[in-house]
Image (spheres, helix red, strand yellow):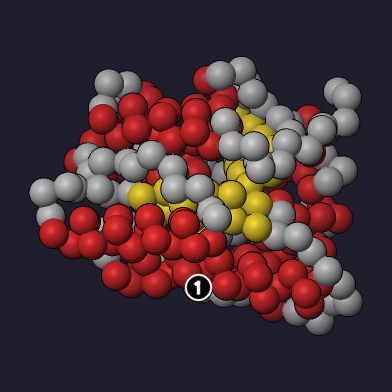
Amino acid sequence: MIRIVVSNQRGGVSKTTTTATLAREFADRGKKVLVIDTDPQGSVASILNLKPEKFLGQLLMERLRFEECVVTVNENLHVICSNRDTVKAEAVLMGNIGRERTFVDLFQPVERHYDVVILDVSPSINLLQTCSMVYTQQILIPVAMDFLSYQGAIAAIRTAESINPLLNTKIRTVGILPVMVDRRLAMTATVLEGLESLAKDTAIPLLPAIRTDQTVTKAARAGQFLADYDPRCKALEDYKHAMDALLALDGLDRKEAISR
C-alpha cells in the first residue's frame, strides 16, 4: 500500500486540492483510498461539501470506533474530516508519552482495508503534522509559483530531515509538485528554475507541473471533485500525469497491506 502526507510550510499552495484530486484518481483506478484531514480549518470537507457527524478530534479524544468517524464518498473513497476540535485534541496529545506515534497506533490496525492513505496537514509545524510524517514516512510537496511557497517547500524538507535522528525514523520527500503554473509569468520561470536546482541538489524527483486553471476554484465552490465538475479540465489532466510519474518512482514505498 501507499501512505503519503501532502505538506508545505506555506498555506494556499493547493495542498487540499492535490489531496482530493489524487485520492479521487486513485479511487477511480480501483484503489481503496482513505483521506485523513488533520488541518483544523477542515478544508477537505469544505471543498467536497461533506457533512460528517464525527471528526478527527473526536476520534482522538473520545476513542470512538474508526467506522463512526469515516465519511463514505463512494465505495473506494473514505474520508476522516477535521474541524476546530482538532486543536483541542492536539493539546491533549501533547501530554502523552510517545505522542509522535499516535497515528501509527491509530491507523495501522485499520489500514488493511485500504490500498492508499493520504493525509492533508496544516501549513504550520505542529504535533499532528509530525504524527502524519511518522506514520506515512513519505511526503509530497506541492509548490505554488511564489517565493514564499518555495521557501515553505525547503522548510518541509528540512523538518523531515530534523525529525529523523530525533525519532529514529526514515521520513523522506518522494516528490516536489509544481502547482498553479502559468508560464507566461516571469515569477513562474524563476520558481521553476529554483525547483529544478532544489530537486538536483536533494535528489528529490520534480513531478510534472499542474497548470493554473480557474476550474479548480469553481469546483471547490461547487463542492465537487474536479473529475465531476469538469473531467476535461487541464488541471485534472495534469494531475493524472503527475500521479503516473509519482507511481513510476523507484523510491516510492509501497508497503504491503495486510490481506483483506
Q: Tag 1's secondary structure?
A: helix
In-image side of 95 versus 239 (left or right): right
Q: Which residue is mark 1?
A: 155
Q: Relative to 162, is 196 above or below?
A: above
Q: Residue at x 63, y 47 (%)?
A: 4
Q: Percent position (x, y) of residue 68? A: 73, 42
Question: Label 1: few (<14), some or many (≥20) within 10 Å?
Answer: some
In-image side of 244 versus 253 (left or right): left
Which residue sits furthest bottom? 95
Name the amino acid type tagged 1.
Ala
47 or 216, which is in the foreground? 216
Residue 228 seen in the current view: yes
Quadrant occupied by the C terminus? top right
In-image side of 224 versus 45 (left or right): left
Quadrant occupied by the N terminus? top right
118 or 43, which is in the foreground? 118
Which quadrant of the figure has residue 17? top left
Q: Residue at x 33, y 72 (%)?
A: 148
Residue 119 seen in the current view: no
158 or 60, which is in the foreground? 158
Q: Percent position (x, y) of residue 112? A: 82, 33
Q: Percent position (x, y) of residue 255? A: 78, 38
